Image (cartoon, rainbow, N blue to C red):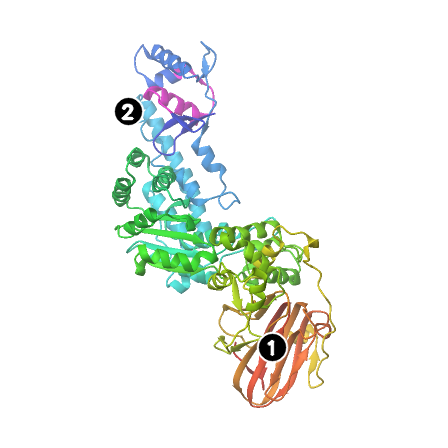
């Protein structure tokens, strides 16, 4: 299909490949493409040539076009017409705000002043027609840009910067950018709709605002000196989306590459991804780098060209575990260039400690920032599923986007294939020599002792336990996980004699690797009688009573993970506790050291509870003189509850113990005064 490209320097292309044409032929085709109607030969001849030889000149041009297989009609036909698209048609067909609309792609079609290069190619009548068409195209482009401006004005500033820059390149008068103010204001601004990801399961989510803000602040520092971010997180945890949200305020040249040990391959891939984003006149300089046989020389020349270009560069590198020493040296060298440049290196959690130390040997310490994806929380997802299902999916997914998505719309104890594959790949990349030993450990009852591990591994000659503890594959687990509140500081009480897998998902992936259900793995959930409610407690289960007005706020937002796989998420108005584990459950106990005497009131909701043995319970509150427990059956079959009981002055403890639990606390008060989380 032929395309006449008029939104900038005018040229003809066939299936995206430019065709070389004489100037008169291009002027003729442009006229027919924009008029979109059959035109008489004599009219065309008089527009493009003066004098008695005009028709003969037209026949010559038509013959040249036929040699390129471009036909404007049958031979000697009086009316001529061109069947072709224009880039204007493509630009207008991309509706602003539509699902497939990408601002940068849409703006890239606008290459410059419309119909450039056709001046002085015809008669004064053609020049008059050309000026009228140029004004018409300017009006169309300005209306489209203003529509995009209005759309982006409801979102973040990044799109506005790029629209204003493009409008000024085209010579259009444009308003000033709105002021988003402080970094806090930028973080609070809503995300571009393209940065709200929707999965086929119906799960819609947005990146964590604190992480987006942190990356955004580093991106702002890159304006003064290049910066590098080592971003840890599992596959499909939303790392790219977080980077996109954080960097949308600048017109970055964006390149995404997989790490390689070959510097020449890496540079070639970088340059080839960069070239389509460059102005036409700068592309030959960068293409010339591909012919340079020495990669070290190519690095220096690339830096000089990027300096001359003067545009910010964002390089995102995945599978960073495979970076070679030569490539790390080159990255360190490029961080000294006077260029606005941001490197984002994606790592999985197992490799994060090792890579942060390794990168610190080659990259300047003040330019290297180590960040990690926080767990997904309920406030960042929207899905058309019952709330209990969503919370249970977050629990069993351990706050990992991929695992949560795969658990919807109906959570299941079975490990989804995509999740299992991603987890086993982490092990293969970081500790392949320990894989078989880790499988043996994963099949032990949790938690297990050092002696039990030695027996299973035949004295552990490879040091698997030591290596797994160092990588956070395993963790030491106390029987009671003590947390001092409101600092949320975990207290360690040695000696710790038992250990378990840090991630139940990883344990399950390893335990099921190469096994079948008759290998001794049981997926059945045992049931146990639960303890009865202490009569000192009054239980109220009226949702209307629970959700009454005037409940105090719970404090700042954040996420904490404690030993034994317990997560505590402080969201806007609630605290949520999750655990997904196996084997004997440790107890999580939150302690406030000195609270006044008075009536304790806990308002909350229980959405999921599974016991490992008869000692498990979903909630207990006690002062130094008593222990008041509740069980799932007495919390109205899961749902909202309000608990009341007396407390003496002194310590107050809130505890839970479960194989799996999703517990929400809406408020905790003593004598009517809020207790801070």
Q: Is residue 221 something that shows in the picture?
A: no
Tell me where residue 414 appears, x and y as whole percent: 66, 55
Badge 1 is on which residue?
Answer: 655
Which residue is located at x 33 percent, y 23 percent? 125
Q: Which residue is mark 2?
A: 120
Q: Nearer the viewer, mark 2 or mark 1?
A: 1
Is residue 34 visible in the rendered image? The answer is yes
Q: Quadrant of residue 253?
A: top left
Residue placed most toward the observer, 492 or 400: 492
Left or right: where does residue 382 sit relative to residue 334?
Answer: right
Q: Per the image, is 37 magenta?
A: yes
Q: Alpha-carbon distance for marks 2 and 1?
A: 84 Å
- Closer to us: 362 or 517: 517
| Residue closer to the observer: 133 or 645 | 645
Give whichever of 26, 331 is nearer the camera: 331
Q: Is residue 411 above or below residue 604?
A: above
Magenta stretch encompasses residue 67: no
Circle on res. 37: none
């Amino acid at each position: 299909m032929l395309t006449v490209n008029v939104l900038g320097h005018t040229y003809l292309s066939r299936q995206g490949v430019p065709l070389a044409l004489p100037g008169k032929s291009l002027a003729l085709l442009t006229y027919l493409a924009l008029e979109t109607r059959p035109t008489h030969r004599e009219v065309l001849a008089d527009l493009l040539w003066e004098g008695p030889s005009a028709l003969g000149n037209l026949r010559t041009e038509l013959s040249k076009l036929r040699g390129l297989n471009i036909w404007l009609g049958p031979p000697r036909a009086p009316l001529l017409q061109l069947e072709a698209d224009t880039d204007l048609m493509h630009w207008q067909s991309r509706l602003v705000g539509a699902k497939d609309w990408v601002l940068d792609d849409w703006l890239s079609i606008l290459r410059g002043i419309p119909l450039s290069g056709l001046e002085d190619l015809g008669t004064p009548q053609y020049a008059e027609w050309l000026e009228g068409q140029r004004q018409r195209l300017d009006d169309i482009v300005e209306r489209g840009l203003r529509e995009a401006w209005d759309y982006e004005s409801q979102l973040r500033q990044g799109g506005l910067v790029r629209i204003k820059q493009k409008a000024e390149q085209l010579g259009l008068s444009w308003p000033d950018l709105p002021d988003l103010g402080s970094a806090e204001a930028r973080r609070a601004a809503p995300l571009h709709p393209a940065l709200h990801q929707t999965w086929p399961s119906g799960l819609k989510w947005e990146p964590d605002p604190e992480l987006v803000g942190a990356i955004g602040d580093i991106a702002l520092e890159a304006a003064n000196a290049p910066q590098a971010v080592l971003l840890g997180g599992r596959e499909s945890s939303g790392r790219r989306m977080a980077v996109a949200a954080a960097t949308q305020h600048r017109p970055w040249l964006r390149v995404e590459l997989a790490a390689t040990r070959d510097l020449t391959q890496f540079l070639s891939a970088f340059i080839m991804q960069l070239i389509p984003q460059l102005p036409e006149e700068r592309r030959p300089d960068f293409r010339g780098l591909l012919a340079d046989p020495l990669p070290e020389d190519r690095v220096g020349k690339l830096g000089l060209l990027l300096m001359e270009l003067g545009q910010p560069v964002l390089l995102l590198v995945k599978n960073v575990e495979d970076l070679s020493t030569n490539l790390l040296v080159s990255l360190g060298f490029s961080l000294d260039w006077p260029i606005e440049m941001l490197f984002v290196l994606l790592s999985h959690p197992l490799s994060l400690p090792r890579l942060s130390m390794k990168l610190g040997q080659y990259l300047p310490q003040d330019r290297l920032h180590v960040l990690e994806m926080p767990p997904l929380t309920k406030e960042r997802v929207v899905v058309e599923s019952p709330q209990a299902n969503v919370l249970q999916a977050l629990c069993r997914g351990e706050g990992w986007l991929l695992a949560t998505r795969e658990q919807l719309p109906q959570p299941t104890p079975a490990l989804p294939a995509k999740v299992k594959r991603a987890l086993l790949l982490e092990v293969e990349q970081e500790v392949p020599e320990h894989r078989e030993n880790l499988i043996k450990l994963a099949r032990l009852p949790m938690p297990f002792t050092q002696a039990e591990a030695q027996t299973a591994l035949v004295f552990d000659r490879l040091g698997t336990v030591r290596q797994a503890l160092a990588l956070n594959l395993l963790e030491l687990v106390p029987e009671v996980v003590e947390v001092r509140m409101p600092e949320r500081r975990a207290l360690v009480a040695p000696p710790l004699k038992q250990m378990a897998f840090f991630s139940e998902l990883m344990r399950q992936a390893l335990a099921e690797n190469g096994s079948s259900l008759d290998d001794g793995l049981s997926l059945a959930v045992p049931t146990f009688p639960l303890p009865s409610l202490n009569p000192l407690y009054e239980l109220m289960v009226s949702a209307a009573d629970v959700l009454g007005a005037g409940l105090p706020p719970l404090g700042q937002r954040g996420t904490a993970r404690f030993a034994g796989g317990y997560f505590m998420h402080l969201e806007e108005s609630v605290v949520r506790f999750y655990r997904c584990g196996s084997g004997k459950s440790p107890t999580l106990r939150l302690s406030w050291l000195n609270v006044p005497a008075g009536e304790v009131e806990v308002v909350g909701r229980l959405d999921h509870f599974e016991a490992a043995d008869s000692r498990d319970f979903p909630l207990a509150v006690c002062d130094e003189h008593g222990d008041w427990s509740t069980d799932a059956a007495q919390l109205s079959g899961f749902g909202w509850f309000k608990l009341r009981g007396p407390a003496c002055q002194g310590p107050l403890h809130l505890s839970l113990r479960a194989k799996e639990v999703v517990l929400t606390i809406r408020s905790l008060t003593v004598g009517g005064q809020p207790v801070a989380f």
